[in-house]
Amino acid sequence: MRWVRKELWSSSTARRGEARHHRRERYPKRPSRVFRMDRQRKRKRSRSRTAGSAGHIRYNRAVWDRISGWYDCRHACVLGGTSATAWGLFRVPESKLGLLGNTRGKAILELGCGAARWSIALARGGARSTGIDLSSVQLARARELQRESKVRFPLVRASAEQLPLRDGVFDLVFCDWGAMTFADPMRTVPECARVLRPGGKFVFATASPFRYVTFDRAKDRQSRRLLRPYFGSYRIDLGSDAAVEFQLPYGTWIDLFRKNGLTVERLMETRPTPGRQSRYLSRPDAKWGRSWPLETIWKLRKE
Ligand SMILES: C[S@@+](CC[C@H](N)C(=O)[O-])C[C@H]1O[C@@H](n2cnc3c(N)ncnc32)[C@H](O)[C@@H]1O
Protein backbone atom coordinates (compact mmCIF):
# COMPACT_ATOMS: atom_id res chain seq x y z
CA MET A 1 0.00 0.00 0.00
CA ARG A 2 2.80 2.38 0.84
CA TRP A 3 3.96 2.79 -2.75
CA VAL A 4 0.59 4.23 -3.64
CA ARG A 5 0.60 6.69 -0.76
CA LYS A 6 3.98 8.01 -1.89
CA GLU A 7 3.67 7.79 -5.64
CA LEU A 8 0.03 8.04 -6.57
CA TRP A 9 -1.87 10.34 -4.32
CA SER A 10 -1.78 13.89 -5.44
CA SER A 11 -2.20 15.61 -2.09
CA SER A 12 -2.12 15.15 1.63
CA THR A 13 -5.77 16.26 1.66
CA ALA A 14 -6.70 13.13 -0.25
CA ARG A 15 -4.76 11.02 2.25
CA ARG A 16 -6.54 12.62 5.18
CA GLY A 17 -9.88 12.15 3.40
CA GLU A 18 -9.29 8.44 2.88
CA ALA A 19 -8.29 7.85 6.49
CA ARG A 20 -11.46 9.60 7.64
CA HIS A 21 -13.65 7.44 5.40
CA HIS A 22 -11.92 4.25 6.57
CA ARG A 23 -13.10 5.00 10.07
CA ARG A 24 -16.66 5.79 9.00
CA GLU A 25 -17.35 2.78 6.80
CA ARG A 26 -19.79 0.17 8.04
CA TYR A 27 -21.59 -2.67 6.30
CA PRO A 28 -25.31 -1.79 6.21
CA LYS A 29 -27.38 -3.30 9.00
CA ARG A 30 -30.72 -2.81 7.29
CA PRO A 31 -30.47 -3.98 3.70
CA SER A 32 -34.25 -4.44 3.65
CA ARG A 33 -34.59 -0.67 3.15
CA VAL A 34 -33.09 -1.01 -0.30
CA PHE A 35 -36.23 -0.25 -2.26
CA ARG A 36 -38.32 1.64 0.26
CA MET A 37 -38.39 5.38 0.45
CA ASP A 38 -40.72 7.74 2.25
CA ARG A 39 -42.14 10.77 0.48
CA GLN A 40 -39.75 13.26 2.04
CA ARG A 41 -36.69 11.24 0.99
CA LYS A 42 -38.13 10.89 -2.52
CA ARG A 43 -38.54 14.68 -2.77
CA LYS A 44 -35.00 15.25 -1.51
CA ARG A 45 -33.69 12.63 -3.93
CA SER A 46 -35.30 14.19 -6.97
CA ARG A 47 -33.93 17.62 -5.95
CA SER A 48 -30.36 16.31 -5.64
CA ARG A 49 -30.74 14.30 -8.86
CA THR A 50 -31.22 17.55 -10.77
CA ALA A 51 -28.63 19.68 -8.99
CA GLY A 52 -25.91 19.62 -11.69
CA SER A 53 -22.74 17.56 -11.54
CA ALA A 54 -22.37 17.48 -7.75
CA GLY A 55 -26.05 16.49 -7.73
CA HIS A 56 -25.65 13.24 -9.68
CA ILE A 57 -22.57 12.31 -7.63
CA ARG A 58 -24.38 12.83 -4.33
CA TYR A 59 -27.46 11.09 -5.64
CA ASN A 60 -25.54 8.09 -7.03
CA ARG A 61 -23.52 7.74 -3.84
CA ALA A 62 -26.75 7.56 -1.85
CA VAL A 63 -28.19 4.97 -4.28
CA TRP A 64 -25.07 2.79 -4.13
CA ASP A 65 -24.78 3.08 -0.35
CA ARG A 66 -28.40 1.99 -0.12
CA ILE A 67 -28.38 -0.90 -2.60
CA SER A 68 -24.86 -2.21 -2.02
CA GLY A 69 -25.90 -5.02 0.37
CA TRP A 70 -28.68 -6.16 -1.97
CA TYR A 71 -26.46 -5.87 -5.08
CA ASP A 72 -23.69 -7.90 -3.52
CA CYS A 73 -26.01 -10.70 -2.29
CA ARG A 74 -27.82 -10.91 -5.62
CA HIS A 75 -24.77 -10.90 -7.86
CA ALA A 76 -21.98 -12.44 -5.75
CA CYS A 77 -22.44 -15.77 -7.55
CA VAL A 78 -21.58 -14.23 -10.95
CA LEU A 79 -18.99 -11.75 -9.67
CA GLY A 80 -16.80 -14.02 -7.56
CA GLY A 81 -14.82 -17.24 -7.93
CA THR A 82 -13.85 -18.06 -11.49
CA SER A 83 -16.05 -15.17 -12.73
CA ALA A 84 -14.07 -12.55 -10.78
CA THR A 85 -12.23 -11.65 -13.98
CA ALA A 86 -15.12 -11.90 -16.41
CA TRP A 87 -16.77 -9.07 -18.33
CA GLY A 88 -20.18 -7.58 -18.42
CA LEU A 89 -23.74 -8.75 -18.47
CA PHE A 90 -22.85 -12.19 -19.83
CA ARG A 91 -19.68 -12.64 -17.75
CA VAL A 92 -17.35 -13.38 -20.67
CA PRO A 93 -13.99 -14.47 -19.17
CA GLU A 94 -11.02 -12.14 -19.60
CA SER A 95 -9.01 -15.29 -20.43
CA LYS A 96 -11.15 -15.53 -23.58
CA LEU A 97 -11.09 -11.85 -24.56
CA GLY A 98 -7.54 -10.92 -23.52
CA LEU A 99 -8.38 -7.22 -23.26
CA LEU A 100 -6.13 -6.38 -20.31
CA GLY A 101 -2.99 -8.17 -21.49
CA ASN A 102 -0.36 -9.29 -19.03
CA THR A 103 -1.10 -7.55 -15.73
CA ARG A 104 1.71 -9.02 -13.59
CA GLY A 105 3.72 -6.21 -11.97
CA LYS A 106 1.52 -3.53 -13.60
CA ALA A 107 0.02 -0.55 -11.75
CA ILE A 108 -3.73 -0.92 -12.24
CA LEU A 109 -6.63 1.33 -11.30
CA GLU A 110 -10.21 0.03 -11.16
CA LEU A 111 -12.83 2.77 -11.46
CA GLY A 112 -15.94 2.00 -9.45
CA CYS A 113 -14.48 -1.22 -8.09
CA GLY A 114 -17.48 -2.10 -5.90
CA ALA A 115 -16.48 -5.09 -3.76
CA ALA A 116 -13.20 -5.15 -5.73
CA ARG A 117 -13.37 -8.79 -6.80
CA TRP A 118 -11.72 -7.96 -10.13
CA SER A 119 -8.88 -6.06 -8.41
CA ILE A 120 -8.37 -8.76 -5.79
CA ALA A 121 -8.07 -11.43 -8.49
CA LEU A 122 -5.61 -9.29 -10.48
CA ALA A 123 -3.56 -8.54 -7.35
CA ARG A 124 -3.38 -12.28 -6.68
CA GLY A 125 -1.87 -12.64 -10.12
CA GLY A 126 0.85 -10.10 -9.27
CA ALA A 127 -0.75 -6.80 -10.35
CA ARG A 128 -0.35 -3.68 -8.19
CA SER A 129 -4.05 -2.88 -7.85
CA THR A 130 -5.79 0.25 -6.63
CA GLY A 131 -9.59 0.43 -6.35
CA ILE A 132 -11.64 3.63 -6.39
CA ASP A 133 -15.31 3.80 -5.57
CA LEU A 134 -17.85 6.44 -4.67
CA SER A 135 -19.69 4.33 -2.11
CA SER A 136 -18.27 3.73 1.34
CA VAL A 137 -20.61 0.74 1.76
CA GLN A 138 -19.27 -0.88 -1.40
CA LEU A 139 -15.72 -0.23 -0.16
CA ALA A 140 -16.52 -1.71 3.25
CA ARG A 141 -17.51 -4.92 1.44
CA ALA A 142 -14.27 -4.72 -0.57
CA ARG A 143 -12.29 -4.52 2.69
CA GLU A 144 -14.10 -7.59 4.01
CA LEU A 145 -13.13 -9.50 0.88
CA GLN A 146 -9.55 -8.25 1.16
CA ARG A 147 -9.39 -9.58 4.72
CA GLU A 148 -10.89 -12.93 3.67
CA SER A 149 -8.54 -13.31 0.73
CA LYS A 150 -5.52 -11.85 2.57
CA VAL A 151 -4.84 -9.60 -0.41
CA ARG A 152 -4.20 -5.96 0.43
CA PHE A 153 -4.07 -2.91 -1.81
CA PRO A 154 -5.34 0.66 -1.58
CA LEU A 155 -9.08 1.29 -1.72
CA VAL A 156 -9.92 4.94 -2.13
CA ARG A 157 -13.28 6.60 -1.71
CA ALA A 158 -13.48 9.15 -4.49
CA SER A 159 -15.35 10.01 -7.63
CA ALA A 160 -13.83 8.97 -10.94
CA GLU A 161 -14.68 12.47 -12.13
CA GLN A 162 -11.99 13.88 -9.83
CA LEU A 163 -9.27 11.35 -9.10
CA PRO A 164 -7.05 12.20 -6.11
CA LEU A 165 -4.12 10.60 -7.96
CA ARG A 166 -0.98 11.80 -9.67
CA ASP A 167 -0.47 12.17 -13.41
CA GLY A 168 0.95 9.31 -15.48
CA VAL A 169 1.27 6.63 -12.81
CA PHE A 170 -0.93 3.78 -14.09
CA ASP A 171 -0.25 1.18 -16.77
CA LEU A 172 -3.91 0.24 -16.94
CA VAL A 173 -7.21 1.85 -15.95
CA PHE A 174 -10.28 -0.34 -16.28
CA CYS A 175 -13.81 -0.93 -15.14
CA ASP A 176 -16.60 -3.41 -15.66
CA TRP A 177 -19.88 -1.45 -15.49
CA GLY A 178 -18.28 0.74 -12.83
CA ALA A 179 -17.77 4.50 -12.84
CA MET A 180 -17.80 4.74 -16.66
CA THR A 181 -21.50 3.87 -16.53
CA PHE A 182 -22.47 6.17 -13.66
CA ALA A 183 -20.18 9.19 -13.99
CA ASP A 184 -19.95 11.98 -16.53
CA PRO A 185 -17.59 10.84 -19.33
CA MET A 186 -16.73 14.46 -20.13
CA ARG A 187 -14.99 14.45 -16.73
CA THR A 188 -13.89 10.82 -16.32
CA VAL A 189 -12.21 10.40 -19.71
CA PRO A 190 -9.81 13.36 -19.18
CA GLU A 191 -9.09 12.09 -15.65
CA CYS A 192 -8.28 8.57 -16.88
CA ALA A 193 -6.05 9.94 -19.64
CA ARG A 194 -4.27 12.09 -17.05
CA VAL A 195 -3.40 9.24 -14.65
CA LEU A 196 -2.27 6.86 -17.43
CA ARG A 197 1.34 6.52 -18.54
CA PRO A 198 2.06 6.99 -22.25
CA GLY A 199 1.27 3.63 -23.85
CA GLY A 200 -1.04 2.74 -20.93
CA LYS A 201 -4.39 1.04 -21.58
CA PHE A 202 -7.91 2.11 -20.68
CA VAL A 203 -10.52 -0.66 -20.94
CA PHE A 204 -14.13 -0.37 -19.86
CA ALA A 205 -17.43 -2.18 -20.25
CA THR A 206 -20.67 -0.25 -20.16
CA ALA A 207 -24.10 -0.10 -21.79
CA SER A 208 -24.39 0.45 -25.52
CA PRO A 209 -26.30 3.48 -26.81
CA PHE A 210 -28.85 1.01 -28.28
CA ARG A 211 -29.81 -0.07 -24.78
CA TYR A 212 -30.98 3.42 -23.88
CA VAL A 213 -32.70 4.46 -27.07
CA THR A 214 -34.87 1.34 -27.03
CA PHE A 215 -35.43 0.92 -23.28
CA ASP A 216 -39.11 1.00 -22.36
CA ARG A 217 -39.23 2.51 -18.91
CA ALA A 218 -42.91 1.71 -18.31
CA LYS A 219 -42.41 -2.01 -19.07
CA ASP A 220 -38.90 -2.06 -17.62
CA ARG A 221 -37.49 -3.88 -20.63
CA GLN A 222 -35.90 -3.47 -24.03
CA SER A 223 -38.27 -2.80 -26.90
CA ARG A 224 -37.99 -3.07 -30.66
CA ARG A 225 -38.82 0.61 -31.08
CA LEU A 226 -36.70 3.72 -30.88
CA LEU A 227 -38.15 5.40 -27.82
CA ARG A 228 -35.74 8.28 -27.30
CA PRO A 229 -33.32 10.23 -29.44
CA TYR A 230 -29.85 8.92 -30.11
CA PHE A 231 -28.30 12.31 -30.80
CA GLY A 232 -27.83 14.32 -27.67
CA SER A 233 -28.07 11.23 -25.43
CA TYR A 234 -25.96 12.05 -22.43
CA ARG A 235 -27.35 11.85 -18.93
CA ILE A 236 -29.89 9.06 -18.45
CA ASP A 237 -32.49 8.81 -15.71
CA LEU A 238 -33.94 5.32 -15.81
CA GLY A 239 -36.39 6.24 -13.08
CA SER A 240 -37.50 5.07 -9.63
CA ASP A 241 -34.59 3.72 -7.62
CA ALA A 242 -32.02 3.55 -10.39
CA ALA A 243 -28.73 5.44 -10.31
CA VAL A 244 -28.19 8.16 -12.92
CA GLU A 245 -26.25 6.80 -15.92
CA PHE A 246 -24.39 8.45 -18.79
CA GLN A 247 -24.11 7.59 -22.45
CA LEU A 248 -22.82 9.24 -25.62
CA PRO A 249 -23.34 8.64 -29.33
CA TYR A 250 -20.44 6.62 -30.80
CA GLY A 251 -19.02 9.61 -32.70
CA THR A 252 -18.98 11.74 -29.55
CA TRP A 253 -17.14 8.99 -27.62
CA ILE A 254 -14.48 8.82 -30.33
CA ASP A 255 -14.06 12.62 -30.46
CA LEU A 256 -13.73 12.69 -26.68
CA PHE A 257 -11.08 9.93 -26.70
CA ARG A 258 -9.06 11.63 -29.44
CA LYS A 259 -9.22 14.98 -27.69
CA ASN A 260 -7.66 13.32 -24.64
CA GLY A 261 -4.90 11.50 -26.51
CA LEU A 262 -6.59 8.08 -26.45
CA THR A 263 -6.58 5.83 -29.51
CA VAL A 264 -9.29 3.20 -29.98
CA GLU A 265 -7.71 -0.26 -30.26
CA ARG A 266 -10.91 -2.22 -30.14
CA LEU A 267 -14.66 -1.80 -29.67
CA MET A 268 -16.41 -5.01 -28.69
CA GLU A 269 -20.17 -5.33 -28.82
CA THR A 270 -20.85 -8.41 -26.74
CA ARG A 271 -23.36 -10.85 -28.19
CA PRO A 272 -24.69 -13.72 -26.08
CA THR A 273 -24.65 -17.23 -27.49
CA PRO A 274 -28.17 -18.59 -28.25
CA GLY A 275 -30.14 -19.27 -25.07
CA ARG A 276 -27.54 -17.62 -22.84
CA GLN A 277 -29.08 -16.00 -19.75
CA SER A 278 -27.78 -13.15 -17.61
CA ARG A 279 -28.16 -12.55 -13.90
CA TYR A 280 -28.71 -8.87 -14.75
CA LEU A 281 -31.39 -9.28 -17.41
CA SER A 282 -34.82 -10.76 -17.91
CA ARG A 283 -35.01 -13.67 -20.38
CA PRO A 284 -36.59 -11.51 -23.13
CA ASP A 285 -33.89 -8.85 -22.70
CA ALA A 286 -31.12 -11.46 -22.87
CA LYS A 287 -32.72 -12.73 -26.10
CA TRP A 288 -32.97 -9.13 -27.37
CA GLY A 289 -29.18 -8.98 -26.96
CA ARG A 290 -28.81 -11.59 -29.72
CA SER A 291 -30.09 -9.05 -32.24
CA TRP A 292 -28.83 -5.71 -30.91
CA PRO A 293 -25.86 -4.80 -28.72
CA LEU A 294 -26.71 -4.31 -25.07
CA GLU A 295 -23.18 -3.48 -24.02
CA THR A 296 -19.90 -2.21 -25.38
CA ILE A 297 -16.35 -2.81 -24.22
CA TRP A 298 -13.89 -0.10 -25.30
CA LYS A 299 -10.16 -0.73 -25.36
CA LEU A 300 -8.04 2.42 -25.69
CA ARG A 301 -4.33 3.28 -25.64
CA LYS A 302 -2.83 6.48 -24.33
CA GLU A 303 -0.61 8.02 -27.01
C1 LIG B 1 -22.58 -1.92 -10.98
S1 LIG B 1 -21.39 -1.57 -9.71
C2 LIG B 1 -20.04 -2.43 -10.37
C3 LIG B 1 -18.98 -2.74 -9.38
C4 LIG B 1 -17.99 -3.81 -9.83
N1 LIG B 1 -17.42 -3.51 -11.11
C5 LIG B 1 -18.72 -5.10 -9.87
O1 LIG B 1 -18.90 -5.64 -10.95
O2 LIG B 1 -19.11 -5.57 -8.80
C6 LIG B 1 -21.00 0.14 -10.03
C7 LIG B 1 -20.02 0.74 -9.03
O3 LIG B 1 -19.63 2.04 -9.52
C8 LIG B 1 -19.53 2.90 -8.40
N2 LIG B 1 -19.62 4.30 -8.86
C9 LIG B 1 -20.70 4.95 -9.34
N3 LIG B 1 -20.38 6.21 -9.66
C10 LIG B 1 -19.07 6.37 -9.39
C11 LIG B 1 -18.16 7.46 -9.49
N4 LIG B 1 -18.54 8.66 -9.95
N5 LIG B 1 -16.87 7.27 -9.11
C12 LIG B 1 -16.46 6.06 -8.62
N6 LIG B 1 -17.29 5.00 -8.50
C13 LIG B 1 -18.57 5.15 -8.87
C14 LIG B 1 -20.67 2.48 -7.50
O4 LIG B 1 -20.51 2.93 -6.18
C15 LIG B 1 -20.62 0.97 -7.66
O5 LIG B 1 -19.82 0.38 -6.68
Image (cartoon, rainbow, N blue to C red):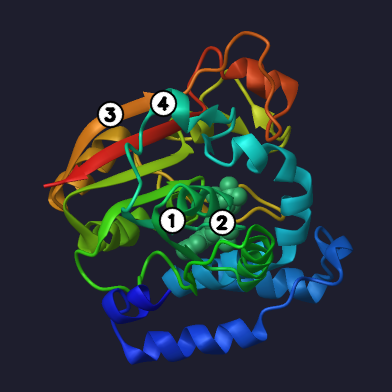
Q: Is mark 1 within 8 Å of ligand 1?
A: yes
Q: Earlier in the sequence, mark 4 or mark 2?
A: 4
Q: Residue at x 25, y 40 (%)?
A: 300
Q: Is mark 4 within 8 Å of ligand 1?
A: no
Q: Quadrant of residue 139?
A: bottom right
Q: Earlier in the sequence, mark 3 or mark 4?
A: 4
Label 3 close to label 4 by CB (< 8 Å): no
Q: Is mark 3 within 8 Å of ligand 1?
A: no
Residue assigned mark 3: 266
Label 4 close to label 2 by CB (< 8 Å): no
Residue type (three-letter) at the residue carrying disc 2: Ala
Q: Earlier in the sequence, mark 4 or mark 1?
A: 4
Label 2 close to label 1 by CB (< 8 Å): yes
Rounded to the nearest whole Å, what is the CA distance between mark 3 and mark 4?
11 Å
Rendering coords of residue 102 (x, y %): 32, 39
Q: Is mark 2 within 8 Å of ligand 1?
A: yes
Q: Nearer the viewer, mark 2 or mark 3?
A: 2
**Mark 2 element type:** loop
Residue assigned mark 1: 110
Residue assigned mark 4: 97
**As displayed, is residue 185 above or below residue 147?**
above
Relative to residue 86, is residue 33 drawn left or right? right
Q: Which mark is residue 116?
A: 2
Relative to residue 127, is residue 227 drawn left or right? right
Residue type (three-letter) at the residue carrying disc 1: Glu
Rendering coords of residue 123 (x, y %): 47, 54
**Mark 3 element type:** strand
| Residue 244 in view in this figure | no
Q: Earlier in the sequence, mark 2 or mark 3?
A: 2
